[in-house]
Image: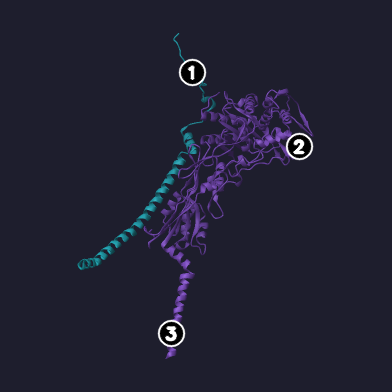
Amino acid sequence: MIARIWMTFGLFLLGFFFVVFRLFYWQVVVADRLRIVAASQYFYELTIPASRGSIFASDGSPLVINQSAYLVYANPRLLTDPKRISRDLAPLLSLDPGQVLSLMQEPGRVWVPLAHKVESSVVDTIKALNLKGIGFEKEPRRYYVEASMAGQLLGFVGSDTNGNDKGYFGLEGYYDRELRGKDGVVQLEKDAKGAPILIGEAHRIEPQDGRSLLLWLDRAVQQIAQRRLDEGLRKYGAQAGSVVIMDPSTGGVLAMASIPNYDPGRFVQFDKDLYKNPIVAGSFEPGSTFKTLMMSSALNERKVTPTTTMDEAPVQIGDYTIRTWNDQYHGAITMSQVLEYSSNVGMVFVEKKIGKEKIIDYIRAFGFGQPTGIDLEDESSPAIRSENDWKDIDLATASFGQGIAVTPLQMVRAVGALANGGWLMEPHAVKEIREERGRIIRIAPKRVRQVIDASSASVITEMMIAAVDRGEAKWAKPAGYRIAGKTGTAQIPVAGHYDAQKTIASFVGFAPADNPKFVMLVTLREPTSSPWGSETAAPLFFTIARDLFTYYGIPPQ
Amino acid sequence: MKRIVQITLSCIPPLALVLLVVELIVSNELAGLGQRLAHIDIALTQARQERETLITQVASASSLFAIQAKADELGFRPPTKDQVISLGTDRLPVAFHSTPQ
């Protein structure tokens, strides 16, 4: 009897410990997991996506904005007739019906993305079909208002390895973090039907929308540059070309056009080689346009004046003979005439006057051999030889812009210094960064250094005006305007030697010369109508300049 | 004193009943408000979407691309060299005085 009582007691005790053990398991061991499961039943969490910032031209008109778009997905378990649905959907999503069907029939999938960033109008059409098992998730996409205009300056938005939006190249790449913003989150207690409970627990972190950018770029100037470059390429039969226009007093980029280019809104349809902006990432030998910088250096060193004379004749440097571009010689010529005739032997005279050390110093001072610091992702800079690697022939050829590689942006910025009292500016595409809440961050123009003094800058300006008025391109110049400029025709290096036929024709200048509103560089690669800058790039420059004078209301001086 | 306590105690049950009814009504209202809030959220999302669509349409209509296409259609052409005439510099007088001969 006593034994049975003890046995019963023992069983009760065992049961008691079993219950305590199970309680310990549910309330301590797996408590956290159960809390999360319970929270998912009575809490709903919603990510509030941040809007990517917009990009505006200088007049406030939008260049890049966000457009409503959706991710279209399928829930294979809810699809009633996958074959019919794939046939209905495929043409709307511009996909192959077989491809859509195979996605829908993937084994073990409960959620299948069919198409990303589908336009609202297409989504409305799909919704009208009332297809069970097809859902939509908001996925805004970028809209490039002016299509391919300034495409390489703007860059594009693609996806990173996690499928999130990321900017690449140009402004979208450089300012990706500023533009992206930060997603918010909201957590609300919900009832059995899924509606929020007002007096329940709620946590909300507001999204921080991306910042917007206001550019220096003038929409009308960009359009002029783009249109005229397109016409010029066809007229002169060139392979490629570029136009870059800057405000020399601020370093603000007013326009950047290059052809071939691409539409950032449809970047996947274009060759990847087009994504890089040739104005900041491509290099070329500047040719005779470089003479303006070397001449200004000699003026600054007080080694020459505009009236200093030299005897123009072929010059022997080691095994090489330096000749003029047309092998014509004018006897005793002034420095001013060296620029008018674009005399290579005249520039060798100037180079010897400056001296090796100073030449290299001035090349670096004008910003060559290092990036300009422009706020675009793809900038690169060709290297300059180290001081010990410069031979006499290298110095001689560099004086007339051969044997040295520069980017178009470096070239236009350096000539911009001549227009700006000798001050080299840091170029910028963005003028202001604007937050959604109204705070504005202004990016002030930045003076890098004074390369030449103001009086040397005035003198070289007058010499460049004379080079335009009396040089090879005088026939194309708009009458009545004082334009400072210089033509350039550089041979293209191919496999260690210069190609006899192929050239890069260029013209660099600023106007109006007395109070420059813009500095501009035009380059044409391999023009077939004529290899010379005076017959191709120069008239194109003057055509654009004429349009700009009309646009800015600048009368003849 | 005893009477006051008795009256107070006798009021408690009906008071409790009234409070219970009020609580039921308020809870019911709150539950309904939650649904109305959900509807307002949906309406807000739709309004935001419409606003985005309209911004896109305005931007598209005012793009230089669209303006140039419309200008070409209407027969506008860029000015040629001989169509732009500058009337002179600042040194020119505002008006000329002509005396009868």
Task: Please tell me the colour of chain B.
Answer: cyan
The C terminus of chain A, quarter of image: top right
Residue farthest to the left? Answer: B3
| Mark 3 or mark 1, whichever is nearer to me | 3
Tell me how far mark 2 sits from mark 3, CA to CA: 106 Å
- Which residue is labeled 2 in the image? A391
- Which residue is labeled 3 in the image? A9
Tell me how far mark 3 sits from mark 1, CA to CA: 123 Å
Give the image location of residue A417, x and y in percent: 61, 32
The answer to whether the residue labelled 3 contacts the one labelled 1, judged by CB atoms less than 8 Å apart, is: no
Left or right? Give the position of A128 relative to A277: left
Task: Please tell me the colour of chain A.
Answer: purple
The secondary structure type at the circle numbered 2 is loop
Please state the chain letter of the residue tagged with numbered disc 1 in the rendered image.
Answer: B
Going from N to C along the chain, the mark reached first, 2 or 3, is: 3
Which sits in the foreground, B100 or A254? Answer: A254
Give the image location of residue A481, x and y in percent: 57, 25
Tell me the kind of residue under disc 3.
Phe
Residue farthest to the right? Answer: A319
Q: As displayed, is residue A10 above or below residue A490? A: below
Residue B93: mark: 1
The secondary structure type at the circle numbered 1 is loop
Left or right? Give the position of A338 relative to B23: right
Tell me the kind of residue under disc 1.
Pro
Tell me how far mark 2 sits from mark 1, CA to CA: 61 Å
The secondary structure type at the circle numbered 3 is helix
Tell me the kind of residue under disc 2.
Lys
Residue A177: mark: none
